[in-house]
Amino acid sequence: MRPVDIKRLARHLLEDEISLDEFVTRLAAPTADLGEVALDLDRARRCGFPEVVFGEGKTVATIEKIFARLHDEGVEAFATRVDEDKADTLASVFPTARYNSLARTLRLPAAETASEATPSADAAFPKVRGRVAVVTAGTTDMPVAEEARETADWTGAEVTLVQDVGVAGPHRLPERLADIRGADAVVVVAGMEGALPSVAGGHLDCPVIAVPTSVGYGANFGGFAALLSMLNSCAANVAVVNIDAGFKGGYLAGLIARQAARGRAS
């Protein structure tokens, strides 16, 4: 457990907000037993960011329990693939939660009373870790791009969104390169034939994380055509994540941006 977490727990103990037994349990255990969920409380220390909730397939009650515990731990809770009905119910429980209906992401800011333990105050999870650009080929790719943008923003990166610069209008990407260059990592989201990451990679000197989407006609095969195009990219700085995996693209970009920011600070 991080020193800031131990201090926060000790403060709660001294103020009689938790019992001695609960203090010892939390201090000793990196996992919270929430019944059907074994919540990883040690992930930020090991991996850089706290556990993220995959909302699809989970009940509202389960997400509520996870959010409540993360909030109690002084963590900004983040969930992906949350439909509007679930989000509406959770918003009634957590009034400060913010839902992005396009991205289907739900974020609950860390408790202000636990400001010492919030990611923005902790040197291990600073508010800004670097810069990420999220680039889309077309407007129909926006749900996946928004998931990537929300995720990268949650990691603390400064995020720039560049929309609708696909290869059907080849002049559009060069017109926006000034907004993209200087990013520590670029997430490129594209469906159809998936050509944009290769084109972008040829203009950029940073990692390009290609995210194929399921957007396209029949021979697109639900994103497999774009996936295979990206995997066969001749641009050496292009790496590929799964189909419609905006979260994975944004998360990796956030990690890269954090490491780059640390390098500049050292």
Image: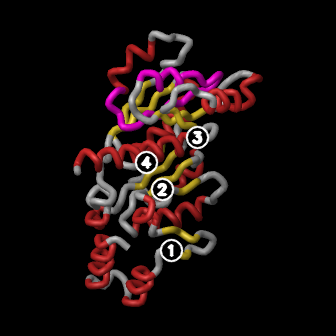
- Contact between marks 2 and 4 (CB within 8 A): the answer is no
Tell me which amino acid carries mark 2. Ser
Q: Is-magenta flag for residue 224?
A: no
Residue in the image at 26% along x and 66% along y = 116
The N terminus, quarter of image: bottom left
Tell me which amino acid carries mark 4. Arg
Q: Which callout, 3 or 4, points at the residue further toward the start of the chain?
A: 4
Tell me which amino acid carries mark 1. Thr
Q: Nearer the viewer, residue 179 or 65?
A: 179
Q: Measuring from the top left, give residue 144's x and y in whole percent.
A: 55, 36
Residue in the image at 51% along x and 41% along y = 249
Write the start and end of the magenta stretch as one range: 181-203
Foreground mark, 3 or 4, reads 3
Residue in the image at 40% along x and 86% along y = 24
Q: Which callout, 2 or 3, points at the residue further toward the start of the chain?
A: 2
Q: Which residue is mark 4?
A: 98
Check disc 3: other Cα within 10 Å, few if <14, some if 14-19, many if 20+: some
Q: Which callout, 2 or 4, points at the residue further toward the start of the chain?
A: 2
Residue 92: give its label. 2
Q: Which residue is mark 3?
A: 241
Task: Examine the image and state in which quarter residue 172 appears.
Answer: top left
- Contact between marks 3 and 4 (CB within 8 A): the answer is no
How far apart in space, not on screen, are marks 3 and 4 (Cα)? 26 Å
Residue 31: give its label. 1
Task: Examine the image and state in which quarter residue 230 appears.
Answer: top right
67, above or below 132, in the image: below
